[in-house]
Amino acid sequence: MKVTFRQSGGFAGLVRGCDLDTDDLPAAEAAQLEGLVERSRLRAGKAEPHPAARDLIAYEIKVETAGGEVAAAFDDASVPAGAEELVRYLQKQAGPRPPL
């Protein structure tokens, strides 16, 4: 499984992210990431931005598996139910990155 994460926006507009491949992670960490992705139940698509909040953080997550690819985009106001834990995990792994 490959997971690509980008976080952008906010007051400073910085882009942070990570590119993770479970084949490159220790077994326990790979299992943790796979579990977080499964529990997040991400669906492809882009949530409508919250109209009253310009400085919200925007997130883009792409998950590639043997079964296909799912790409989702949302902001702080529209994080899908169940995806909060995955976002927190990915934020801890994130560093400066170019936009997707």
Image: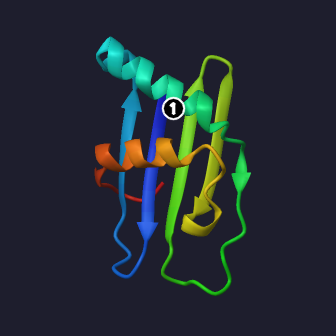
Q: How many marks?
A: 1
Q: Label 1, secondary structure: give it.
A: helix
- Measuring from the top left, give residue 50's x and y in whole percent: 66, 77
| Position of residue 42 measured from the top left corner of the image (x, y, whole percent) | 66, 40
Q: Residue at x 54, y 84 (%)?
A: 54
Residue that appears at 50% across and 75% down: 56
Residue 1 visible: no
> Residue 23, located in which quarter of the rendered image?
top left
Depth check: 100 or 89 in front? 89
Between residues 86 and 3, which one lies in front from this camera angle? Answer: 86
Q: Is residue 9 visible?
A: yes
Q: Residue 90, how many percent across, how many down?
A: 39, 44
Up-down relation of residue 73 to residue 63 (above or below): below
Display colour scheme: rainbow
Above-or-below relation of 50 to 69 = below
Q: Residue furthest bottom?
A: 52
Taking the spot 30% from the left edge, 43% from the top edge, the residue there is: 93
Q: Is residue 75 left or right of residue 47?
A: left
Residue 48 vertical placement versus 41 (above, below): below
Amino acid type of the residue that numbered disc 1 sits on in the rendered structure: Leu
Identity of the residue drawn at 61% across and 68% down: 77
Local packing at callout 1 (Cα closer than 10 Å; few below 14, some 14-19, many 20+) is some
User: Where does the image place residue 39, in percent across and percent down from the top left?
Assistant: 60, 32
The residue indicated by pointer 1 is: 36
